[in-house]
Image (cartoon, rainbow, N blue to C red):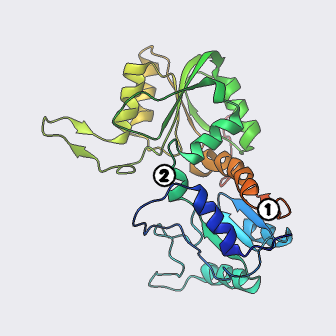
Amino acid sequence: MIKLTNRDVVNKILEYHPKIENYSGCDCFKSGHEDDICTGVAVCLDPSMNAIKRAVEAGCNLVVTHETLFYQTPDYKIWKGDYKNTIFTEKDEYIKKHRIAVFRDHDHMHFHQPDCIFTGVMKELGWGKYYVKPVERDFSYIFDFGFEGFVYSDIIELFKEKINFNGIKYLGDKNMKIHKAAIVGHMCPNCFYPDHEEKDGTYHDYSMDIIKLMEENGVDLIIPGETIDWTVPAYIRDANELGHPKALMNIGHYNMEELGMKDFAKVIQKLVCSDLKVEYLQSKDSFNYINFRK
């Protein structure tokens, strides 16, 4: 058996990804021990305390994660708040005590064409045969699917089965037929490019692009990672009120991308020697739900 260091494993992952010129983003080791011999790779979407503990229990000293380790959008390795964070300190001490190397793999996964995370979601859902290759458009992070007419509630059940989330917010009639669906990026202000007004006076943002998709391409169902209430959801509520059936599944950022990391764990296993253990650690749903309507 060829012994690989944690750095060796990460280098194999980076060789798999497309190269990003002059890269200076968040993808890097977030803790030390890069040159320790790798005893196993734990792959997760969310490097929560629960996931780190499960990695230790599984005998894995390398954690490959998609999201942030220490609660800060720039994903610093240290706490940069102007106050003491006891949770950061305890988590950091646990990672150091167990000599866990944590590598974040975010930007490189999304740099694939098509996007590596959303390709993985498509594979895990079994939707590859429904995938409609993208047409030329001036906005990205959209995966189009065409169906003969799935019942909306069946799609919700499929996601529940695959992701095992605790609940879901949705818009639209659960009994409606879905002929066109789109898995899209996070519909938040300035998420993929700055919201702006063109010289001709037209306004442009990502949510406007999604509404255009529904208006001009006949998309029935939108499945975003995150959303805000006053853009696409408001449009869909009004569409239904006016007799134009539209739907939206708001399953959440982490739930949405979970399947992408599940698929990527299989990729990592192929990249490293077969004797090296690669464990996928499914994250728990971030939230619990109380249904007040009986």
Q: Is residue 59 left or right of residue 168?
A: right
x 45%, y 60%: residue:
20
Question: In the rendered image of this protein, does residue 61 appear above or below residue 21?
Answer: below
Q: Is residue 172 left or right of residue 97?
A: left
Q: Residue 28, which numbered label?
A: none
The residue under label 1 is 273
Near-viewer residue (115 or 83): 115
Which quadrant is home to the N terminus? bottom right
How packed mark 1 is, by other alpha carbons closer than 10 Å (few <14, some 14-19, many 20 or more), is some
Which of marks 2 and 1 precedes in the sequence? Answer: 2
x 68%, y 42%: residue:
167
The residue under label 2 is 111
How packed mark 2 is, by other alpha carbons closer than 10 Å (few <14, some 14-19, many 20 or more), is some
Residue 218 picture quarter: top left
Amino acid at dot 2:
Phe
Residue 294 picture quarter: top right
Q: Is residue 47 visible?
A: no
Nearest to viewer (mark 1 / mark 2)? 1
Structural distance between the alpha carbons of marks 1 and 2: 25 Å
Where residue 245 appears, as percent x and y from the top left, is 50, 17
Question: In the rendered image of this protein, does residue 93 appear above or below residue 185?
Answer: below
- Work out which residue is located at the far front of the displayed protein and give it: 2
x 75%, y 44%: residue:
164
Where residue 187 appears, as percent x and y from the top left, is 43, 43
Q: Is residue 120 left or right of residue 205?
A: right
